[in-house]
Amino acid sequence: MAIPAAIGVWELGALAAGGLAGLFVASPQGREAAREAARATAEALEKLRPVPESDAGQRSEPIPRGTTQSCSGQPDCGKEMCPVCGKRPNPMPGVTPAYVHGDLVPQDSETLPPLTSYKRTRIRVQKATVYQRPDKSLVHRDKLHKGKGAEIEVYDRHGRHMGAICPHCGHPRKGPKPGRRLKL
């Protein structure tokens, strides 16, 4: 199966998770098929990971949107902090989202977990789609903050503001603003 170059890591993971759910059976054959699917997914993700930069470490051109940066070969790769907020350990060690380097607003598919994996609603805020998480809370990306300042706004199921979180690790960035609500 050919993997399009534009597909993101999380989209590929979601496809694999969907495939794993379809393959899961309480039999040895089902478990073996699930292991094989997991191996194939890991190989595909490894092929999508870009080659590390030269020793100079300086970029001559910006990173294209949707690509990631690897830190393989660095001694503290597993202990690095979130490249967006710096408050929690990086959930994907060695990977820095492209929107951080380009000082861009993250796309819905570039957050962790991707907002596109949640149920889409008809509500829009600042032209950003609002998604409903499994716990019925509502989230959308804040288009006013870019790069390392990027945020995801979180609301309870009634539309009351609960605060803002980091789009990469989920660490709370700001508390709730009294009076801020979504129009449901």
Image: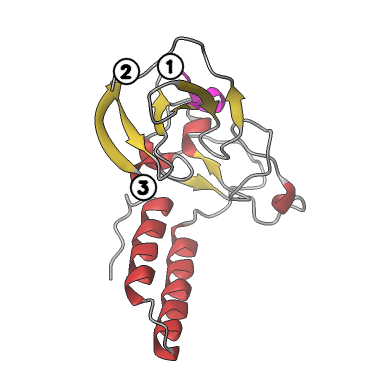
Q: Amino acid at mark 1?
A: Leu
Residue at the image position 46 percent from the left and 20 percent from the top: 161
Q: Quadrant of residue 143?
A: top left
Question: Residue extending furthest bottom?
Answer: 28
Q: Amino acid at mark 3?
A: Ser
Dot 1 and dot 2 residues touching (CB under 8 Å): yes
The residues bearing labels 1 and 2 have C-alpha atoms spaced at a distance of 9 Å
Range of residues picked out in magenta? 144-151
Question: Residue extending furthest front?
Answer: 158
Residue at the image position 42 percent from the left and 83 percent from the top: 26
Dot 3 and dot 1 residues touching (CB under 8 Å): no
**Secondary structure category for the residue under label 2:** loop
Residue at the image position 35 percent from the left and 19 percent from the top: 182
Q: Is residue 177 left or right of residue 66?
A: right
Question: Residue extending furthest top?
Answer: 179
User: For mark 1, what is the residue?
Assistant: 144
Instruction: Pinpoint residue 101: horizontal percent, then vertical percent.
Output: 52, 32
User: For mark 2, what is the residue?
Assistant: 126
The residues bearing labels 3 and 1 have C-alpha atoms spaced at a distance of 22 Å
User: For mark 3, what is the residue?
Assistant: 117
Position of residue 58 relative to residue 20, above or below, is above
